[in-house]
Amino acid sequence: MYNFRAKKEKGIGKQLKTYTKYWYWFAIAIICSLGIGYFYLKYATPVYNATASIIIKDKQATNNSDASFGFSGADILGMRSQKIESELSILKSRRLMEDVVKALNLNVSYSLEGKFRSIELYDDKPFTVEMLSYKAKKLSNYSNTYQITYLGDRQFRVVNLKTLETSLVKTNTTLDLGFSKIMLTKPSEQDKNLPIKVSFNSVTATAANYRNRINLSQAENNSNVIYFELKDPVANKAKNILDQLILEYNKDAIEDKNLIAENTANFINERLTIINGELDSVETDKVVFKKENKLTDLSSESEMFVRNASEYNNRKQEVGTQLELVNTILQYLSSEKNNELIPSNLGIEATGVNQQISEYNTMVLERNRLLNSSTEKNPMVSRIIDNIQQIKSNIIQSLKQNRSNLQIALNDLKRQSYSISSKILEIPLQEKQNRGIERQQKIKESLYLFLLQKREENTLALAVTEPKAKVVDQAYSTYVPVSPNPRSIFLGCTLLGFLLPFSSIYLFNVLDGKVRDKSDIQENLSKDIPLISEIPALGKLERNYLIKENDRSVLAESFRMLMVNLQIMLNKKLKRLGSRVIMVTSSIKGEGKTFTAMNLGITLANSRHKVLIIGADLRNPQLQRYGSTKTATNTGLREYLEKDEISLASLIEKTNFHHNMDILYSGNIPANPTELLKPEKLESMFTELRQNYDYILVDTAPSMLVADTSILNCYADFTLYLIKAGFTNKENLEFIEDAKENEILSNIGCVLNYVQFSNLRYGNKYGYGYTAKKINLK
């Protein structure tokens, strides 16, 4: 016997098989999706992409980078990035986009209604609608669509598509629509009688629409380049919008620049008037200050005072020195007793005194020479001494006079020095006051010159209107639709066609609580409860269908496999030989117990085994529907259990299905079947039957609903537990586990009944010599 639990499909192979058996669903879904994609591509409105790029001129950033003075590169890049972000906000502003809408009349759209889609007209519109006035408050968001048809002879028919109100209007004449007065111009004769749908939208709503659709991005490395992108069903329209947006941006920047320049000029002129008056006042204060202090050039006069003070100090020192010398000589002469020589060449500036001292010293030397050869009484010596005394007296008198003159000169020098010193002391205060006046004068002068320079620069700025943005690439389009993309659409449709059945199957498997195939049993039951066989569902069989002798169908082969596997299981579990009692049960009604018992009995009978089938379901007997050899009988197991006088052999009937198979029907339905199942009676019955039959198949009641099956299980050698694919809930498998653990049912083996042919693990995979032929279809 092949061990059905020895090997499990794992991983991707198991999951793949879950979906591949429904391959036709995938094929149908993909074909339908591709068909939908084809029709979508055929009738969808193509969308074109327009792009443009500009460079934002930033002279301030350039100047900052040239003279950064400690600003790092990261700082400059950060300031530049913030600048570009600000410009992006301006380009995305509602105000700027509203200017674009007004300039291009984008709030008025023209379209030609087709069978499946509308075609927007832009360059090739047959006429033009000019809005002469605009009342935004009266413009509705829902009733602004009109159908305008050129009738020829300069006449139009205008129909309000909401109210169906019709008006006739001539070319270049006004028509009042309530929210605006319009004029129709430039009619094309070749588009005569062609109805055109014209929609009037608010400028604000139209601007908001295009603001959301325009993509702005900054180039890499924080550069000043900005890229524009706009997708629209009309390529030229998208190009014109981008070009107009750049134009309005430059126009707005120039207007801001001119406004700033005009305000700056007014400010500069006002400041020049004020500073001119302040400068005149400062210069007047300077003149008054110099007059009051009798100054011409404070710096030169300060130097002169310092120089004069130095000269007076030197002169005072010289006079003081002369005075000290005169006092020294007078002191020397007053203390001289012997009329000795007087020191000469001491630096006395008095010429007469020096001559007298020289004459005095000459006479003293002459006297001394004469005294060497004579005495003082010598007339010549006496006369020289008298002359010496006279000259000495003259010298003393001259020195006293010189001393007096020097004292007067010294006093005068002191007075002059004091006067100069007082003037020098006044200089710092005067310098402070003068510096304050000159500082104010220089500030006013530099500010005045600065304002004059700025006024000239501002005048040049007004004269030169340089745009703020330099156009790198004007708006352009390849005129190749970017949407819908056939490759993406077909790829998406293929993916959708794959995902729809895939997700449906996945959700069905996730939400499905029924047992479908072998894997569900393996996942919910332990290895102690083996799956013995699978019985296929081959079409809608007759309710009482039974296999035939020498039947080669898949159904017959599945019962042969069940028989073989069952015999192997019995031989392993039972060491003794002899008759085998096999109980056939299930969790609930309708899982194929009677069908399986009958066909298994026929299969065993075909193998030359003596088989008896007992209808032990006393509550809802099903064996009766297969009929019997006797025409009418209502006796069976119930009567045997209830009446001791009835023999078992009299209740067993021969069948016309096979000469080796007999049936013991359940008989009439009793009031309480459980009370009839007495151990001693059942023991006696099975002992007698084992002597006459090789296999006894007991068709019992559902195990989950009544206790009859657990009573009969005591006499069974093996329990075949029926599970019906697509019918039995996975929760019911828990009952089998509990019955095994609690020994309510013993020697259990499962049979998966009514398995779809695609879920069969072996017959469908290999198909060795057998075909699923139709069997008695209704």
Image (tube, rainbow, N blue to C red):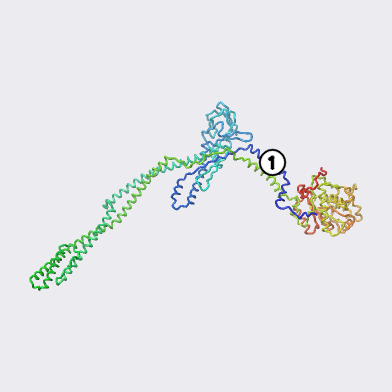
Q: Give the x, y percent position of residue 110.
A: 57, 34
125 or 20: nearer the eye?
A: 20
Q: What residue type is labelled 1?
A: Ile
Looking at the image, can residue 395 be seen? yes
Which residue of the protein is positioned furthest toward the front in this rendering?
373
Q: Give the x, y percent position of residue 586.
A: 80, 53
Question: Vertical placement of 572 versus 462: above or below?
Answer: below
81 or 389: nearer the eye?
A: 389
433 or 410: nearer the eye?
A: 410
Looking at the image, can residue 727 be seen? no
Residue indicated by mark 1: 31
Q: In which quarter of the image is the C terminus?
A: top right
Which residue of the protein is positioned furthest toward the top in this rendering?
153
Q: Give the x, y percent position of residue 741.
A: 77, 59
Left or right of 141, for residue 654 = right
Q: Give the x, y percent position of residue 418.
A: 24, 59
Left or right of 562, for residue 325 = left
Few, some or many C-alpha atoms within 10 Å of disc 1 (few <14, some 14-19, many ≥20)? some
Q: Residue at x 44, y 49 (%)?
A: 66
Q: In which quarter of the image is the N terminus?
A: bottom right
Question: Vertical placement of 665 versus 484: above or below?
Answer: below
Disc tally is 1
Secondary structure under tag 1 reads helix
Left or right of 355, for residue 551 = right
Q: Residue at x 65, y 38 (%)?
A: 39
